[in-house]
Amino acid sequence: MSSTTIDVNLGGASQSKDRSYKIAIERGLLNDLGARMLTVGPLNKRCALITNPTVGALYRKAAVASLEDAGFLPLVIEIPDGEEYKNLTEIEKVYDRLLEERLERGSAIIALGGGVVGDMAGFVAATYLRGVPYFQVPTTLLAQVDSSVGGKTGVNHRLGKNLIGAFYQPLGVYIDPELLKTLEAREVRAGLAEVVKYGIIWEGSFFEMLEESGTSLGDISTGKVIELIEHSCRIKAEVVAKDERESGVRAILNLGHTFGHAIEALTNYSKYKHGEAVAIGMVMAGKFAVKLGICDAQVPERIEKLLEAIGLETHVDGLEPKEFLAAMKLDKKVKGGTLRFVLPKAIGEVSLCDISDGDTLNFLTDI
Ligand SMILES: NC(=O)c1ccc[n+]([C@@H]2O[C@H](COP(=O)([O-])OP(=O)(O)OC[C@H]3O[C@@H](n4cnc5c(N)ncnc54)[C@H](O)[C@@H]3O)[C@@H](O)[C@H]2O)c1
């Protein structure tokens, strides 16, 4: 059984606490979850497994059995399934359960689910009793290639996405690609959008490899998916290690997200999955870069072609430019009132650009 470990190296000598951890990738790893957690350090027997009813019905039994085999006494907490529940109201209900059950500081939280569960469970871990240990067990492709790594946790506010949150690193990320077998094809495609992102922001040769695979990328039954997860996690780990709290280079991971978050918000988080909105956002970023003279037209063309081969939408219709701009200005990437975009210079290289509202509005009107 092939097994891969990737180090996320964080916190140097000057830091008070080393926050480094490992990402383990292995088929069937869920059955080994409890034993893996024991290797990380002393933890209370009592722990909380946070999941949702969809993932819980599929994998809660195996996760609980693995935790119990390792001597843990897991409390299972389910939060409703969906981005619309990624809010403080639901977080409070989780705090209630943890407090009622008297979980202590040494009790670990385990996030078993996609990015929504991961972001929420991570935020609970960051804030419950001022911070308890936690582990990510991502179950969607998007979570396995992106959201489970890097310690961004949080929830949405009615005024925008992920506006409330904390940087808080897990003690380990345990990726079991086998869990993707039950994932809907649409969710697989959404996750692939973030994989494509890594090629654009970091490694042109990875993008070319994705271009060569094209339509077959969505077939998660092949070994290819493990390669994609590994490659994506390595890039994310490298970027996060350089800039844990997004004061510089980490911002490039937001390619397509300023447009994407606005698209999600303007369509009430119901029409597009996060990855789908990011796909449209990456094409928009490419076209914006062409308009500003930052890259040539071939760049967005290649991005669009690859995303279309995967089966993702690359355009959004019917959004009013002024409303679009207003939604983007609620994004965390706004600096001193000016929007900061990640724009491609070439495939494999991006830059951060502060753009005036006037230029942005012109672009949104023309596109
Ligand atoms: N923290 C970060 O760095 C970061 C990065 C990217 C995205 N995100 C966040 O991640 C979220 C999106 O995550 P997502 O795309 O995983 O969506 P999601 O968590 O909503 O999961 C998608 C759907 O798949 C179901 N599901 C999960 N695993 C399954 C499995 N193995 N089999 C069958 N069904 C399964 C879920 O119940 C859900 O219905 C957004 O809220 C986004 O903001 C966070």
Image (tube, grey):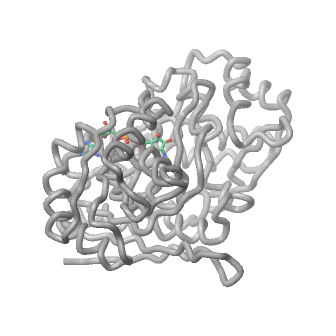
Q: In the drawing, does residue 300 fall left or right of residue 180?
A: right
Residue ID at (67%, 26%): 327
User: Picture quarter containing residue 289?
Assistant: top right
- For the residue pair 262 and 96, the one nearer the viewer reads as 96
Residue 148 location (% of width, % of height): 44, 57
Work out whether 4 lies above or below 278. below
Work out whether 135 lies above or below 264. below
Q: In the drawing, does residue 285 fall left or right of residue 304?
A: right
Of the 4 image quadrants, the one containing the N terminus is bottom left
Residue 215 location (% of width, % of height): 34, 49
Q: In the drawing, does residue 101 fall left or right of residue 17?
A: left
Work out whether 235 lies above or below 365. below
Work out whether 318 lies above or below 292. above
Residue ID at (19%, 71%): 70
Q: In the drawing, does residue 52 fall left or right of residue 274?
A: left
Residue ID at (25%, 55%): 220
Q: Quadrant of ligand 1?
A: top left
Residue 229 location (% of width, % of height): 38, 63
* Residue 318 shows in this picture: yes
- For the residue pair 306 and 272, the one nearer the viewer reads as 272
* Residue 211 shows in this picture: no
Of the 4 image quadrants, the one containing the C terminus is top right
- For the residue pair 218 and 337, the one nearer the viewer reads as 337
Residue 355 location (% of width, % of height): 82, 39
Total marks shown come to 0
- For the residue pair 282 and 11, the one nearer the viewer reads as 11
Residue ID at (57%, 39%): 162
